[in-house]
């Protein structure tokens, strides 16, 4: 350390243990930094005066210093992007706006630094800089990209383009608080970030208490950003073209007195006077933006300064550290020494940040407590008899309507339309949220059905609401679900790590491959079910396959009453036979599977069909008739909840929040699936039946499942194209029994 003596360390607050460099007091330090400007008992600065500006800049440099030393301690991590946001982040903190989310997973070290400086990380036994370095990018520590499990942080951040959904969900649920979301210009080459906010504003014009904060630093991960050549006017117009009424842009170039070339400059090279002038502009601009957003205007704040401002290098080269970028390297040492604060400054920063927002984020941000939920009444179900046909998706729609009528916060999202999925009853009851009121189309400005034509926006808002503690439902065509699934994956992983209960994210995908013949392969893409099946092993993801309309109702009830899980329902919109009573279905969804048909006897041996899907049972039952006529005993087992059929050691169930250790016993499993031949049959791909194939003791087995799409006139024809026919099932059984 440059001033590492026992005497000095004894003067430092305990959290500073491990800080390697300290600097000299700035000019006027005694005048403006004698005590924290956020007094004890306050949640924000009173005024934007000289002391507030001075201490905001101190906070920004503290964030930069901790971020760089943290990354340098492992020769790993991403300091550059957050470094260019430091004045914006510090300003939000000093103004008391601490419910901050981000679109940029690479800003993680900076957000961890913020949680360290406000004391939140003490909740995970990180008390000192040394502790934080030891836990950075380590198991059970501070992972490389943000997680909502880290004390004080509201939401995960990994894949780009997701953060705005969490900010909008927070704003929707908490109208009295501001939800800033930092966005990097590296991801601005794609339009969906702004598009999602524009559609949300059209649907929810009164919910403007989220604030996108663009960190416009000219660079992406490894090169210039796609918007690096925009002029300030072009960038402002870009946002205004997406319905933002107020766009506040602060450009560091306007304050440069160091003669830097180029459109993007590093404010840390300015004189102290100009650094303070720049910080004042950011603080004042952020205050204006926050007040604008809270007063009903769709508002954006843009901070323009060079990527890597104030750390070891600039531009894309500052994005991440490599193994050679360690704390003993001259360029890292120089970067730290430039940002090093005097010993007494750390106390000021800790006092300000720990008081901002009313206390450390771990105690005050909205996701640190469970959101009070509206109790649901027992859902009224329609019992369909086993001698009739019923539409599974319509049966579910009736229950969705009841949930929405009981819980006014509940939102249904769907890009392609509920009516197309035989769920018009949802629209009838809850109404599509739309500025054009039209009863013919069930449109009302206050509807509970949110329909952006973007699966990312549908999935993102539904997932954000669930993560933040409210019920929601994402409906989609199975074919298109892949466009929105990444944020569901991110959120289910976050739910697995949360220290609180939150409603499961519930999704339902209709119009599966077997129903969509005439639409061709564009609507025949059930391969995503392999994605869901792979995620079963995570411990909190449940692909669910109700076999009929009664099972659908039991399945939706089961999913809606679950917590910290991803519930993925796959079902049809066609009238189909009913195989189970509702009570039988409730037992089956809890147990994982149930027998829906069994022959009395057969002298040629027992054939077991293990089936996921609903329409797929039509050829299975046809095959059953012919096999029985040939002297076989046939048992048809409906696999509704395959996650229950794994062995406990197959699933990471004991690593997740709200763990579920219910798995079918060997005795019960064998009673269902034992036979001479096991035929695993799926209307989609085969991965959902993996647990059955892993555990079965049947001496012979085979799989019949989806191969690929084609344009056909009927479901029967698409099944024939994929080899899912009674004749092929019989042929496979006969060959296996030889």
Image (cartoon, rainbow, N blue to C red):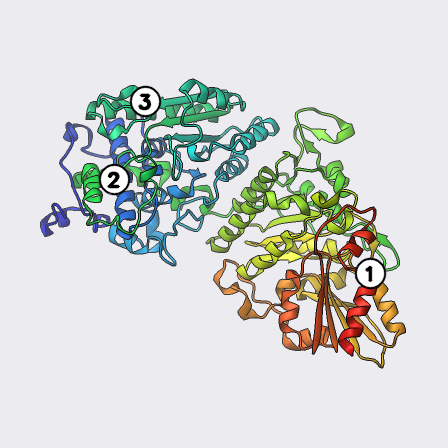
Residue 206's label in the rendered image is none
Q: Residue at x 40, y 50 (%)?
A: 150
**Between residues 37 and 7, which one lies in front from this camera angle?**
7
Q: Which one is in front in this view, the residue at disc 3 or the one at disc 1?
A: 1
Q: Is residue 611 above or below residue 396?
A: below
Is any atom of residue 322 visible in this view? yes
Between disc 3 and disc 2, the foreground one is 2
Q: Residues within 10 Å of mark 3 (few under 14, many from 20)?
A: some
Tell me the number on the disc at residue 281: 3
Q: How far across and down, in percent of the image, does residue 161 sit?
A: 50, 38
Which of the 4 quarters of the picture holds residue 192? top right
Residue 210 vertical position relative to residue 727 in the rendered view, above or below: above
**Residue 619, labelled with which disc?**
1
Label 3: element kind: helix
Position in image of residue 11 (x %, y %): 14, 46
Residue 290: which quarter of the image?
top left
Residue 10 image offset from top left, x and y in percent = 14, 50
Element type where label 1 sits in the image: helix
- SS category of the residue bearing label 2: loop
Q: Image check: 695 left or right of 303?
A: right
Q: Residue furthest top?
A: 233
* Residue at 42%, 47% in the rendered image: 146
* 563 left or right, relative to 731: left
Q: Residues within 10 Å of mark 1 (few under 14, many from 20)?
A: some
Residue 167, above or below 619: above
Residue 147 picture location, percent across and down: 44, 49
Dot 3 or dot 2, earlier in sequence: 3
Task: State the residue at coordinates (60%, 26%).
Answer: 202
Taking depth in this image into account, of 451 and 338 the one nearest to the observer is: 338
**Residue denoted by label 2:** 312
Q: CA distance from mark 3 to mark 2?
A: 25 Å
């Amino acid at each position: 350390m440059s001033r590492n003596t026992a005497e000095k360390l004894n003067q430092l607050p305990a959290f500073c243990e491990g800080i390697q460099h300290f600097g000299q007091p700035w000019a006027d330090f005694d005048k403006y930094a004698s005590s924290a400007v956020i007094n004890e008992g306050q949640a924000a600065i009173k005024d934007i005066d000289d002391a507030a500006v001075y201490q905001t800049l101190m906070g920004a440099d503290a964030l930069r210093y901790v971020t760089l030393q943290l990354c340098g301690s492992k020769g790993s991590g991403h300091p550059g992007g957050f470094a260019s946001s430091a004045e914006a982040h510090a300003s939000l903190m000093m103004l008391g706006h601490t419910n901050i989310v981000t679109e940029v997973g690479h800003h993680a070290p900076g957000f961890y630094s913020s949680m360290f400086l406000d004391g939140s990380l003490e909740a995970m036994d990180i008390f000192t800089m040394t502790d934080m370095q030891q836990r950075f990018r380590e198991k059970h520590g501070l992972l490389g990209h943000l997680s909502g499990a880290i004390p004080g942080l509201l939401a995960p951040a990994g894949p780009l383009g997701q953060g705005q959904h969490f900010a909008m969900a927070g704003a929707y649920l908490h109208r009295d608080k501001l939800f800033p979301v930092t966005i990097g210009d590296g991801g601005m080459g794609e339009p969906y970030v702004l598009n999602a906010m524009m559609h949300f504003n059209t649907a929810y014009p009164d919910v403007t208490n989220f604030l996108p904060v663009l960190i416009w630093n000219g660079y992406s991960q490894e090169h210039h950003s796609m918007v690096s050549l925009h002029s300030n006017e072009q960038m402002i117009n870009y946002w205004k073209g997406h319905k933002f009424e107020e766009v506040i842009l602060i450009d560091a170039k306007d304050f440069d007195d160091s003669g830097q070339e180029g459109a993007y400059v590093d404010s840390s090279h300015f004189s102290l006077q100009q650094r303070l002038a720049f910080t004042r502009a950011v603080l004042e601009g952020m205050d204006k933006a926050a007040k604008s957003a809270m007063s009903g205007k769709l508002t954006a704040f843009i901070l323009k300064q060079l990527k890597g401002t104030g750390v070891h290098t600039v531009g894309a080269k500052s994005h991440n550290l490599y193994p050679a970028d360690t704390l003993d390297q001259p360029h890292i040492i120089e970067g730290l020494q430039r940002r090093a604060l005097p010993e007494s400054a750390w106390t000021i920063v800790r006092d300000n940040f720990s008081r901002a927002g009313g206390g450390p984020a771990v105690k005050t941000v909205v996701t640190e407590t469970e959101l009070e939920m509206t109790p649901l009444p027992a859902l009224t179900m329609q019992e369909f008899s086993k001698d009739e046909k019923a539409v599974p998706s319509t049966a579910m729609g009736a229950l969705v309507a009841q949930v929405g009528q009981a819980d006014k916060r509940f939102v249904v999202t769907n890009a392609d339309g509920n009516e197309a999925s035989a769920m018009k009853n949802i629209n009838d009851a809850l109404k599509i949220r739309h500025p054009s009121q039209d009863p013919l189309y069930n449109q009302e400005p206050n509807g509970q059905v949110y329909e952006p034509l973007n699966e990312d926006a549908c999935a993102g808002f539904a997932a954000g609401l669930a993560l933040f503690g409210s019920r929601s439902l994402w409906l989609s065509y199975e074919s298109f679900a892949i466009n929105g699934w990444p944020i569901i994956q991110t959120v289910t992983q976050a739910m697995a790590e949360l220290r609180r209960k939150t409603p499961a994210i519930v999704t339902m995908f209709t119009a599966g491959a077997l129903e969509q013949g005439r639409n061709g392969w564009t609507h025949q893409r059930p391969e995503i079910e392999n994605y869901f099946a792979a995620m079963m092993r995570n411990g909190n993801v449940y692909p669910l396959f109700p076999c009929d309309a009664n099972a659908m109702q039991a399945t939706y009830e089961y999913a809606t009453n679950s917590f910290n899980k991803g519930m993925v329902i796959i079902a049809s919109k066609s009238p189909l036979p009913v195989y189970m009573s509702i009570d039988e279905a409730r037992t089956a969804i809890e147990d994982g599977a149930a027998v829906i048909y069994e022959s009395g006897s057969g002298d040629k041996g027992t054939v077991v069909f293990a089936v996921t899907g609903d329409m797929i049972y039509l050829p299975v039952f046809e095959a059953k008739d012919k096999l029985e006529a040939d002297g076989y005993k046939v048992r048809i087992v409906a696999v509704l909840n395959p996650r229950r059929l794994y062995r406990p050691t197959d699933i990471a169930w004991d690593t997740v929040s709200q763990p579920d250790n219910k798995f079918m016993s060997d005795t019960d499993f064998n009673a269902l699936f034992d036979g001479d031949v096991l035929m695993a049959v799926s209307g989609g791909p085969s991965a959902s039946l993996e647990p059955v194939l892993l555990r079965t003791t049947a001496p012979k087995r085979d799989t019949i499942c989806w191969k690929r799409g084609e344009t056909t006139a009927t479901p029967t024809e698409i099944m024939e194209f994929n080899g899912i026919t009674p004749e092929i099932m019989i042929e496979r059984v006969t060959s296996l029994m030889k």
